[in-house]
Image (tube, grey):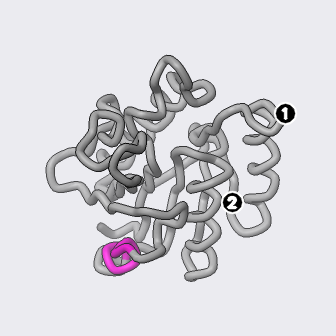
Amino acid sequence: MSSGTALLVIDVQEGMFVPEYPVFDGEALLDKIQGLITEARSSDVPVVYIQHNEEPGEQLEPNSFAWQIQSRIAPAKGEIVVQKFTPDGFHETDLQEKLSSLGVKRLIVSGIQTDMCVEATSKRAGQLGYEVVVVEDAHTTYDQGGRTAREIIEEYNGMFRDFAKVQPAAAITF
């Protein structure tokens, strides 16, 4: 890998797409991330998946169907999957070591949930010295707190600009 770049796909798991409570605009999200993954792979840029884990009996219980990475964007053989238990993908994981071993300095960030894991992982990446690019149309969340998911995404895209570049998927280069 010569670019020093990696694509992060955060918590895009089957449980986020259940008909009873799906993430906002989930099909469009999958289309955008699928396109980014295709471009990254064709550019020999590593795709790094982060997978959230919850306690037994909870939605994202390890090895349950809901816990699996969404089938449309599933990792290829040999791609890195990092297990996490908190919103921050770096907290008590080996993510930083894996990125360092690949010579990664720049992270293209996509995934779920805008206002939780995408925000926490992106912010921490910036604090650790990575150049962070948040893909403004490749992260999502849920309606909550009297606000629509679209409003939350727009607000966080503005906040991400404090510590990251924010670009649409169409403008991302690997």
The residue to which callout 1 is attached is: 146
Dot 1 crowding, Cα within 10 Å, few <14, some 14–19, many 20+:
few
Q: Is mark 1 on a helix, strand or loop?
A: loop
Name the N-terminal-most of marks 2 and 1. 1
Residue plotted at (50% across, 33% down)? 32
Q: Which of marks 2 and 1 is in front?
A: 1
Residues shaded magenta: 93-99
Identify which residue is drawn at 28% across, 34% down: 65
Q: Is residue 157 shown in magenta?
A: no
Give coordinates of residue 27: x percent, y percent. Answer: 50, 22
The image shows residue 149, relative to residue 156, as above or below, that is above
Q: Quadrant of residue 130?
A: bottom right
> Secondary structure of the magenta portion, mostly?
helix
Q: What residue type is labelled 2?
A: Lys
Q: How many labels does the image show?
A: 2
Name the residue tied to disc 2: 165
Q: Which residue lies furthest to the left in this view?
A: 77
In the displayed structure, does residue 128 sit left or right of residue 73? right
Crowd band around label 2 with a 10 angstrom C-alpha radius: few (<14), some (14–19), many (20+): some
Which residue is most to the top? 19
Please identify the quadrant where the C terminus is shown.
bottom left
Give me the disc on residue 80: none
Residue under the image location 29 percent in, 67 percent down: 1
Indicate the position of residue 173 as horizontal and vertical percent values. Answer: 51, 51
